[in-house]
Image (cartoon, rainbow, N blue to C red):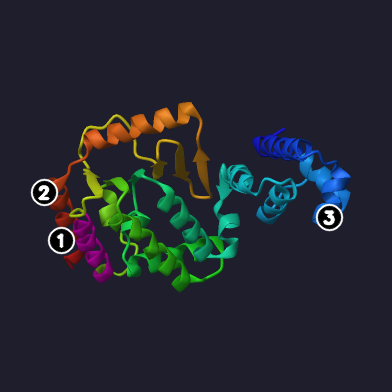
Amino acid sequence: MNDFQQARIALGTRLREMRAEAGLSGRDLAARLGWPQSRVSKLETGRQTATAADLDAWAEGTGHPADASELKGRLLALETSIRSWKRALAGGHRAVQEANVVQEQQAEHIRLFEAAIIPGLFQISEYARAVLTDVSERHGSPRDIDAGVRARLKRQEILYQPGHRVDALIWEPALLTVRCSPDAMIDQLDRLIGFMDLGSVTLGIVPLGARTHFSPKGGFWIIDDTLVVADTWSAEMWLDAVDDLALYRKIFQQLSDAAVYGRGAQRLIARARAVIESP
């Protein structure tokens, strides 16, 4: 039995507990919700994956509407511990970016590392548009590019709101990985320097030539010390095991120790800008 199946069974066990605590039989709950009894049985035994609407109805039907958030949190963990990009993008870029907006608005402290791309939180519209267009072509997903760009830019609101802190590390090659037109790339690098003035942001650049204890791989985000979101070419992994969190915290600290900040980081950005500007 794989992890997905085990998680679905665990969610079903929780649903059965809620029904039992409400003093309802499966037939009673099905009648209350207007469902066939077989649907109640399949959800409780993990033979069918619940939808968010199912969980809202279940919480309401068992007299505990406030528990809907907990149930949907379990569903989210079930569906996204390894989330295929092709599957996630089936509904378009806007849906993915809006989910990121919610996650980041709820976070107090985000630590992130990107090896070959300017982080989404810092992207200008031209850069974001080019990146999302490339992603759509790569995965064959819907091309709701403009809506996706608007939703991605909305993520930057947390940088100007109290109660949020972002510690960002970028490997120097990301500054030279041209994902849009050269003119837009120069604007992106200039904007990156502007973000360094924000009190909510700490931005470091890991320079080429620095002695490191690691080989930079895919980017990752640590959300409030409770979740790691790590990218691969085909999927996004959500990791919350104690050992995984400890490992990624250690790697982030090693990256941070190798990075330069302030004027040192600005010099590296200016150097990348000069390379892109040169004929």
Q: Residues within 10 Å of mark 2 (few under 14, many from 20)?
A: few
Q: What amino acid is labelled 3 in the image? A: Trp
Measure the alpha-carbon separation of dots 2 and 3.
63 Å
Q: Is residue 14 above or below residue 177?
A: above
Q: Residue at x 43, y 31 (%)?
A: 245
Verify whether residue 187 appears in magenta: yes
Q: Residue furthest bottom?
A: 146
Q: Main secondary structure of the magenta part?
A: helix
Verify whether residue 252 appears in magenta: no
Q: Which mark identifies residue 35? A: 3
- Circle 2 residue: 263
Q: What amino acid is labelled 2 in the image? A: Arg
Measure the alpha-carbon separation of dots 1 and 3.
65 Å
Q: Residue at x 47, y 55 (%)?
A: 102
- Circle 1 residue: 274
Local SS, label 2: helix
Q: Residue at x 27, y 65 (%)?
A: 185
Measure the alpha-carbon separation of dots 1 and 2.
16 Å
Instruction: Give the extent of the magenta segment.
Output: 183-195
Local SS, label 3: loop
Q: Is residue 158 above or below residue 141?
A: above
Percent x, y for residue 24? 82, 41
Is residue 10 shown left or right of residue 231?
right
Q: Residue furthest top?
A: 243
Local SS, label 1: helix
